[in-house]
Image: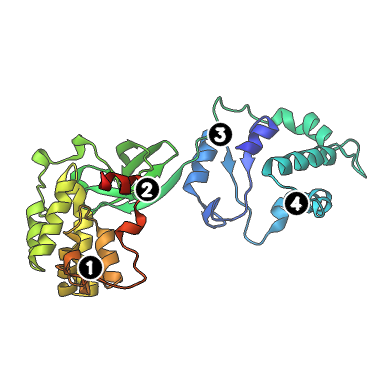
Amino acid sequence: CRAFEFFGGVPRTLVPDNLKSGVTKACYYEPDINPTYHEMAKYYDICVLPARVRKPRDKAKVEVAVQVVERWILAKMRHRKIFSLEQLNIEIRHRLDALNSKPFQKLEGSRLSCFEDIEKGELSPLPPKRFAYVEWKKAKVNIDYHVELDRHYYSVPYHLVHEEVQIRHTYETVEIYHDHQRIACHRRSYDKGRHTTLSVHMPEKHAFKTKWTPERIIKWASTIGPNTANVVENLMNQRQHPQQGFRSSMGIIRLSERYGQKRLEAACQRVLLFDRISYRIIDSVLEKGLDWEKTERTMQELPIIDHNNIRGRQYYQTREDVMEEKC
């Protein structure tokens, strides 16, 4: 996009290499263009014709231009010390203008005059706005009818649980597609661990019409132990909607496969002593072996240490504190 703005127009065709950011799967007859690259080409009304694999002559002038830039710009700057990106761009732009204005050795004019006389008039005009960068991601709808993007969770219609969807996301928006139909649109959020939920995506009375319900997950957790069931119940009660806690609850239950039911029950008993409950905290307790420590032990049960090196409370009193006690 910046190259088009530098040229002041848009070419009719693009001939990229078969790199993954341009071509997902190379093919001589029907190459599979990267979705983001394809959207950019559609926005600027450009035809994409990838070069053949291992055929550098398909873009011979580009290969030579890379060599020229390396020799006349990068090589000449190899002994320069530059301390900021802005300063580097200014230096490159100065040398680029000098290179483009340099006369040809065997032809009349220069690269700049050739561009202005022949190529610039063939460019299509730029659109009013620059193309908004788009990325695509495949995701599977979880039992809480949310999909994950950068550790934030976006809702989709609840009947699509376990279905595969496509997420189209920009800096500002998140669009979700199923069978080439857009089923949800959200404002992009960068709050990790949070949920963005639309009420229209929820089942009636916030209860699933499928087999997944809060009661079933709590009952499943109770087979491990009462502390695990209590953790799962508290976790869902902390959320604005119980379904937002399904993913974390299932993760906690599955920790029993890795650490065993007894250790998970002990870790949940320990975590219940604190105000905050989450999957990450329980996983950390199990990973560090803190579930083996006795949770009933308090500070009153610890023995009082009496040693000459311990200065005691009076050592830390200020002059004002001593005067107040005397008074």
Q: Mark 3: which amino acid?
A: Tyr
Q: Earlier in the sequence, mark 1 or mark 3?
A: 3
Quarter of the figure with residue 171: top left
Q: What SS does tag 4 mark?
A: helix
Q: Mark 2: which amino acid?
A: Arg
Q: Badge 2: few (under 14), some or many (20 or more) residues near its Cα, within 10 Å?
A: few
Residue 143 can be seen in this image: no
Q: Could you give the CA–CA distance between mark 3 and mark 2, rounded to whole angstroms?
A: 77 Å
Q: What SS does tag 2 mark?
A: helix
In the rendered image, residue 268, in percent from the top left (x then y), is placed at 17, 64
Q: Is residue 44 left or right of residue 161?
A: right
Q: Is residue 119 left or right of residue 45?
A: right
C-beta proximity under 8 Å, tags 3 and 2: no
- Find disc 2 in the rendering and name its residue: 319
Q: What SS does tag 3 mark?
A: helix
In the rendered image, residue 48, in percent from the top left (x then y), is placed at 58, 44
Q: Could you give the CA–CA distance between mark 1 and mark 4, rounded to whole angstroms?
A: 53 Å
- Which marked residue is nearer to the observer: mark 3 or mark 2? 2
Residue 44 is labelled as 3
- Which marked residue is nearer to the observer: mark 1 or mark 4? 1
Q: Which image quarter holds the C terminus?
A: top left
Q: Which residue lies furthest to the front in this view?
A: 326
